[in-house]
Image (cartoon, rainbow, N blue to C red):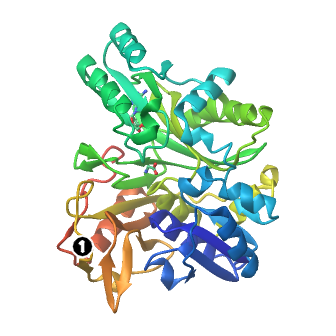
Amino acid sequence: MNILILGSGGREHALAWAVKQNPKCDRLIVAPGNAGMAELAECADININDGGAVCVFAEENAVDFVIIGPEAPLAAGVADDLRAAGILVFGPSKAAAELEASKHFTKAICDACAAPTAGYGHFTDAEAAKAYIRKEGAPIVVKADGLAAGKGVVVAMTEKDALDAVDDMFGGAFGGAGAEVVIEEFMDGEEGSLFVLCDGTDVLPIGTAQDHKRVGEGDTGPNTGGMGAYSPAPVLSAEVEARAMEEIIKPCVAEMARRGTPYEGVLYAGLMIKDGAPRLVEYNVRFGDPECQVLMMRLGAQALDLMQACAEKRLSDAQVNWADDHAMTVVMAANGYPGSYEKGTVIKGVDALPQTSTQMCFHAGTAMKGTDLVVTGGRVLNVTARGPHLEAAQKAAYDMVDQIDWAEGFCRRDIGWRAL
Ligand code: AMP
Ligand code: GLY
């Protein structure tokens, strides 16, 4: 099977690593890829948000299966273009990707199927939004409706912060994304993520994870794309997961099908759990990054079989072979991230790290410059390990971190603290 993976982050490196272990994989191409992916796949320089270009490339290279990593090509309809061209693809249609692209859309789906989530109001006018905030009081959550690269959510602990957030969003702080806002009830509890594959009809859970969004130790400081993650998430016990499947995931997937926009691909549910009851915070229509790294570390080669079964609408026969293990990933980022940071600094020691089925350093923002591994982004390496328990995974991951020589980078030293 010839496989093309779209994307260039740690998520896609982990996908490529898992896929490559499967004997079904003959030729592996990644677009655009990064320095880590270049070690196990061919890198192709195509515009992954251009469905036409992706289809032409796939046809010219006899690609049998395309796996779409990030949300941008999904929101641009690249999966639709591939399906129309008769190319097998893992990833939802543009219409189904609305579950991530529009918070108001997701709220309406939850309403239609009575899935538990925060109460909310939807506004296209700042004064009406402010009146709602004054009526409800703080804490309260203000969200820009569209894709805002994870920065469109303000959890306001005071009424003033909430009112200011409304001004910012209608003032264009988030571009077109702020022309509509959703204002939500603040939900208290512990967060966890549940990942399921959906083939339009059937759903298959493929793991849980928790991430650390804040840049600083003890979960302090500004939000980032994620500084580390681990799987499984203890907060998502078998009972809580079963409730989330029955009360949230299955009803929403059925509602998408009922509307004629069946959901096909991985669905990532962000959940808030309080007293054993899950409520939906948000959906993403892709794997989380860095959550994917820990899921792939646990699934290994079977990830390809599962994604293929999903794309071929055979999930009712598919099953996950679980090992009773734990995985952790520690993100190494450039000093200054998530603010401004330096590019082009040189990282040493990565090529001497173990590359095994239980220890891998996935690359995100890296490139080769001559023989040097250099930094091209904010989140740079995802040092990932697996073990019989979380402590073992954590120790193995930090042992690898300690072998990396990169003065201009940093990581959090407390990934997993909530679970340990
Ligand atoms: P989102 O982009 O919707 O996942 O929001 C980003 C983060 O904001 C979430 O991971 C939560 O930590 C927090 N958040 C979002 N909505 C709520 C809510 N209704 N109540 C409490 N926290 C929330
Ligand atoms: N790590 C959070 C995300 O991928 O959205």
Quadrant in the rendering for residue 269: top right
Residue 195 spot, x, y in % from top left: 58, 47
**Does any atom of ligand 2 lie closer than 8 Å to the CB of label 1?**
no
In the rendered view, tell whether residue 279 sits above or below residue 34: above
Amino acid type of disc 1? Asp
Disc 1 residue crowd, few under 14, some 14–19, many 20+, Cα 10 Å: few
Residue 23 spot, x, y in % from top left: 70, 80
Q: Mark 1 points at which residue?
A: 402
- Regarding residue 320, the answer to whether it shows in the image is no
Quadrant in the rendering for residue 20: bottom right
Q: Please, which residue is most extreme toward the bottom here?
A: 371
Q: Which residue is drawn at 48% across and 59% down?
A: 294
Residue 1 spot, x, y in % from top left: 75, 78
Q: Residue at x 70, y 34 (%)?
A: 250
- Regarding residue 34, the answer to whether it shows in the image is yes
Q: Is residue 154 left or right of residue 326?
A: left
Closer-to-camera residue (232/132): 132
Residue 64 spot, x, y in % from top left: 76, 73
Closer-to-camera residue (404/184): 184
For mark 1, give the secondary structure.
Answer: loop
Closer-to-camera residue (14/169): 169
Q: Which residue is drawn at 19% across and 71% down?
A: 408
In the rendered view, tell whether residue 114 sits above or below residue 282: above
Q: In this view, does 161 lie to the left or right of 250?
A: left
Q: Which residue is drawn at 37% across and 69% down?
A: 365
